[in-house]
Each structure stands twice: as C-alpha cells, then as structure tokens.
Amino acid sequence: MDNIYFNGVLLTVCLAAFLTVMLFGTLYRMVNNDDRAFMDPLSWKLKLLWPFIQIIANFFCVFLPYEMLENTETKISQSGVGYLLTAEQFIALRIISAIIAPFIALFVMVCLDNYQPIWFVFMPLVGFMFPMIWLSDTRKKRDNAVIRTLPVYLDFITMCVEGGLNLQGALGQAMEKAPPGPLRNEFAIVLRDLRSGLSRADSLRRMAERLDISEITSFVSSIIQAEKMGASLATVLRVQSEQRRDERFQRAEKMAMEAPVKLVGPLIMFIFPVTFIVLGFPIVMKFMGEGML
C-alpha cells in the first residue's frame, strides 16, 4: 500500500513538473522576439533567468500601472542600465528574485542544519528589494565616475573651443582624448542627437535629465545661458572647468577628513580588543602561575 502511495505521489510530481515545463515553453514561444542588436550584452546570470524574465514581463508586468512603470524607467535611465533592461523586465527580475530568495535561505539552513521558519517570511521581501539595492549602487558608482572625469572633459572641450572649434567638434575631440566612462557615453548620445537634427540646448537638457547630477545640470545651464546671452563660450567653459576642479579637490579634502572618524568604529570593535588580549594574556598567565588568581 505504501509503495502504491509513493508511486502515485512521484507520478503526480513528475506530471506537474512536465506540465509546468510545457506551459513555460509555450508561453516563451508566444513572447515577441527580443532584438538586442542595440542593447548591452547580458551577464551569464541574467541569461539563465532571461526566459522567465521575458515571460513575466510580457504576460504580467504589462498590466501594471503606468506611473509605476514610468518611475521604474526613470530610475533605470538615471542608473545607466537603460540599454540592458526595460522597466517591465526589471520588475520581472524583482519578482523572480523574490521567488528564488526563500530557496536560497532553505539551502543555507540545510547546510547549517539550523531551521528558522522566520527566514521564509523575510527572504521574499529581501529578494524583491535586492535588485533595487543593486540599481542604487550602480547609480552611485556611475555618478561618482561622471563627477570624477567631468573636469578632464571640460579641460579638453575648453581647449578645443579656444582653438576655434565649435561645441560639437570639441565634444568629438574630447571623446577621442579623454578617458572612457559613463560621461563619454553620454556625450556620444549628445552628438548622436545633434546629428539627428535636435538643437544643442535640447540635446544637453536631455543629458542633464538622464544623469540628474547637480554638476552636469550647472554645466548645461551655463552653456545654454551663454548661447542665449551671446557670451563667450570659451570663457564660460573655462570658469566651469576651474569650478569643477576646485569642487573635486574639496571633495577629496572632505573624504580625507572623514576617514579618521570612520575608522573609530572598527578600531574600537576589532583592534582595541585584540590589543588588550595580546597585552593582558601574559599578565594573566603570570598571576595564575603564582596562584594569585
């Protein structure tokens, strides 16, 4: 009887797994072909999850509120991963992450032989929030890279404009000479917009909206204002270059002054206890040998 019961359960599980695979296969074939000719390449982790991301994005996320999708699209664009994922695909990734997280917790608990059911309550939330944490971290790294390389680009643009080139030619020269990075990609998009017929002011405004960094916004506003007022573009660029360089030096000074404060915590928690143990152990052993303890 037990044999029959076990075989029935096994057959049911196998049938359910087979039907699930068939369902996902059918849904994936119904998904529109994903043309990534002009998109960034996927990492190997995303490639493993991509069929499931596509299914959820096409059959579930398209029904989400427009405001939610627009807000997600803005965050993705400002983080520089707009050519990797759409808003629907990113939300689908969050859903899959929330589903996978409890299984990871179960695997860890099995390895440690310590079962805590409370983790099954929190891990879906942690998994759902993890892509947002990754997106926020990606944006911080991108913003820091843009701010760090901005003075260099401004120096090249200023020299080219003072040498007689217009702003479009100066941007092209700066992209050839300056170091690669996210700012170079943004200037490439500006040049593409200019070649497509968009005005200089609109192209720069779009870059400022994509980056949403105060230094870039100040630079763009100064260029647009100089064009409207008929001021010397070279003079404005020279002032911007010097100001950005001074700000970079001030940020470096601030980080240097913050370093000792940030070291206090690790010093108290890790270094001081070990030092006291190393110094106190021989003394304690000596007292114990003399029978004083």
Image (tube, rainbow, N blue to C red):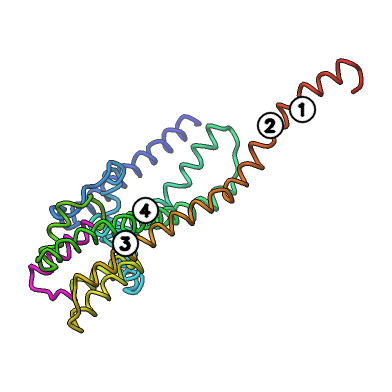
Left or right: 65 in relation to 22: right
Q: Quadrant of residue 239?
A: bottom left
Asked whether the beta carbons under mark 4 and mark 1 sit within 8 Å of each other, the answer is no
**Distance Cα–Cα, label 3 vs label 1:** 54 Å
Q: Please give the name of the residue rendered at 51% of the width and 40% of the height, measured from the top-left corner.
A: 106
Q: Which residue is mark 4?
A: 141
Asked whether the beta carbons under mark 3 and mark 4 sit within 8 Å of each other, the answer is no
Furthest-top residue in this view: 289
Q: Which residue type carries mark 1?
A: Gly
Q: Which residue type carries mark 2?
A: Thr
Q: Which residue type carries mark 3?
A: Ile
**Distance Cα–Cα, label 1 vs label 2:** 8 Å
- Of the numbered discs in the image, which one, if any, rests on residue 76? 3
Q: Which residue is mark 1?
A: 280
Q: Quadrant of residue 212?
A: bottom left
**Distance Cα–Cα, label 4 vs label 2:** 36 Å
10 Å crowding of disc 4: few (<14), some (14-19), many (20+):
few
Q: Quadrant of the C terminus?
A: top right
